[in-house]
Image (tube, rainbow, N blue to C red):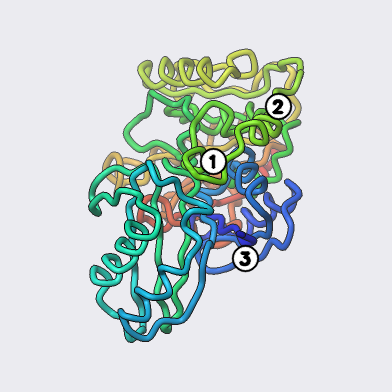
Amino acid sequence: MIDTLFLTAVPGLEATLADEARAAGFKGVTVVPGGVEAKGGWPEVWRANLVLRGTTRVLVRIASFRAMHLAQLDKRSRKVDWAGVLRADLPVRVETTCRQSKIYHAKAATQRIETAIREELGAPIVPAAAEAAIVVKARIEDDLVTISLDTSGESLHKRGHKEAVGKAPMRETLAALILRQMGFDGSQTVVDPMCGSGTFAIEAAEIAAGLQPGRDRAFAFQQLASYDPAGFAALKGTPAVTPVLRFFGSDRDQGAVGGARANAARAGVSDWCQFDRKPISDLTPPEGAAPGLVLVNPPWGARIGERKLLFALYGSLGRVLGEGFAGWRLGLVSPDAGLVKATGLPLKPLGAPIDMGGTKVVLWEGTIPSH
């Protein structure tokens, strides 16, 4: 019987994910290194995958024991209730990490756990690089073996809607947590003047519409012995909300704009979003909109474009926002304080640095002053 869920988070956003989990009604929510722990059984595992916008994947701990050597690992791995969670007819992949333990050889440890699953359950085992319906993750740290299952499968940022992506796409999970950090509750207008594939606007529209992020995709837990299709179906819901056009994206690249429109259509939020081709210099607030949020993930230099050429872009962004968006709150994602300063806007870091694809970025936030 499981009782602990581990929700993985983008490093730097663990506390924000914990806030989301508490708001969604999960119990025993605590921030731990690399993510968030919560308490619950299988229905909460299904619900976490279905409704949490900010977690990258949901792991469940199925066994924990001490092992000082491989023979002990072999013996205790065989006592795990594999039949209670895994199906004998589906392939399993085992991944093991060892840290500061007497068992230090991860490959040998993996082989012992694989043998236990194969001989006690009869499930086929696939090698490390192969595709498998289910992944068993073993962590051996300070001689404590923790065995978990990945219940998500593909990373949860893959909602199943975004086929069109640009050069440096913002992941949906990251966009959702940034929206939460900015205080977005579904009621504010959101403008993204460098929208790329439209992630900020689409994610904001889904939140406003009350759409479950996992509504259109499959999960690894559907391949487990514990899966109850009727129980999971009962967790799904489609709210009846009248669309309001409140989420706007623009980009100078017509291909990006076309891709964003297609992504919004697949997500079912076309009536909530508007995407236009326009340069920063043509940016104006949506007609009749009260001041809301401007969210932007501009080029950084290390990623797209030369840094020295970007000072003019950041300066132009600051001027246009300063002239037309007084009273709006700006959230700007960048690792480069010098470029951010070039906007001329009063921006300060909001929260801890965020790991975005291996680069430590900062969410810079501030209210755009009136001239």
Q: Where is residue 37 in the image (x, y as percent from the top left)?
A: 61, 62
Q: Quadrant of the C terminus?
A: top right
Which of label 2 and label 1 is nearer to you?
A: 2
Q: Which residue is at the front of the view, 249 or 212?
A: 212
- Cα–Cα span, label 3 and label 1: 20 Å
User: Number of labelled discs?
Assistant: 3
Question: Up-down: is 94 above or below 303?
Answer: below
What amino acid type should be assigned to the residue bearing mark 2? Gly
Q: Which residue is at the front of the view, 92 or 82?
A: 82
Circle 2 sits in a helix, a strand or a loop, which is it? loop
Are circles 3 and 1 on residues that touch, CB within 8 Å?
Answer: no
Mark 2 Cα-neighbour bin, 10 Å: few <14, some 14–19, many ≥20: few
Quarter of the image for residue 140 reads bottom left
Mark 3 Cα-neighbour bin, 10 Å: few <14, some 14–19, many ≥20: some
Residue named by callout 3: 31
Q: Earlier in the sequence, mark 2 or mark 1?
A: 1
What amino acid type should be assigned to the residue bearing mark 1? Ala
Mark 1 Cα-neighbour bin, 10 Å: few <14, some 14–19, many ≥20: many
Q: Is residue 225 visible?
A: yes
Q: Which of marks 3 and 2 is nearer the N terminus?
A: 3
Circle 3 sits in a helix, a strand or a loop, which is it? strand
| Image position of 57 (left or right of 103) | right
Which of label 3 and label 1 is nearer to you?
A: 3
Residue named by callout 1: 175
The residue depicted at 74 percent of the width and 57 percent of the height is 27
- Cα–Cα span, label 3 and label 2: 28 Å
Mark drawn on residue 200 = none
Mark drawn on residue 237 = 2
Q: Where is residue 183 in the image (x, y as percent from the top left)?
A: 71, 45
The residue depicted at 37 percent of the width and 46 percent of the height is 300
Q: Quadrant of the N terminus?
A: bottom right
Circle 1 sits in a helix, a strand or a loop, which is it? helix
